[in-house]
Amino acid sequence: MAREELSDRRWEQLRPLLPPQKPRTGRPNNDHRTVLSGMLWILRTGAPWRDLPPRFGAWATVASRFYRWRKAGIWPRILERLHQQGERAGRLDWSLHFVDGTVVRAHQHPRMKRWAAAGAVSVPKCMCGPSGAANRWCWC
């Protein structure tokens, strides 16, 4: 088994959470395991869909199934089920918490105002571009 492929243990954990392999109508889907391995390869590498290695099938097939499953709510359902399984097995430690350190400032930082007043930094009034007020997303 290649490193990129799902192990048998992981596949058996995920298989029941996926939609049926054979759709009610139309031609049968490509193998879910191969397609899911392709999706995981894309997510792990960050490569564009078109760079998907051929062993995972046609890139367009893998991408369309990924987006179709996203639209159908398959991914949150899988995450919830895996969460429940981990909880039942006692493998989740709820004492650990992760906090996102992302900061999005709604107002100009006071230090920037001081620097701008000193002439060290030129701070534009509007970050929305030259269209300014004509831009419907501009709140400046």
Image (cartoon, rainbow, N blue to C red):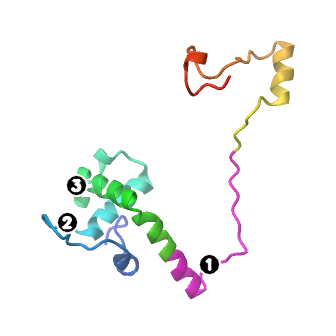
Residue 99 located within the stretch drawn in magenta: yes
Q: Tell me how far mark 2 sits from mark 3, CA to CA.
A: 17 Å
| Residue 73 position in % (x across, y down) | 41, 63
Precedes in sequence: disc 2 or disc 1: 2
What residue is pinned by disc 2?
Answer: 29
Q: Residue at x 61, y 86 (%)?
A: 90
Q: Of label 2 and label 3, which has the lower sequence position?
A: 2
- Which residue position holds label 1? 92
Query: What amino acid is at disc 2?
Result: Asn
Q: Position of residue 114 (x, y in %)?
A: 87, 22
The mark nearer the N terminus, 1 or 3, is 3
Quarter of the image for the N terminus: give it: bottom left
Measure the alpha-carbon separation of dots 2 and 1. Answer: 34 Å
Q: Quick one: SS at disc 2? A: loop
- Farthest residue in the left direction? 27
In this rendering, the answer to whether 120 lies above or below 16 is above
Dot 1 amino acid type: Leu
Query: Vertically, is 87 above or below 2?
Result: below
Q: Nearer the viewer, mark 2 or mark 3?
A: 2
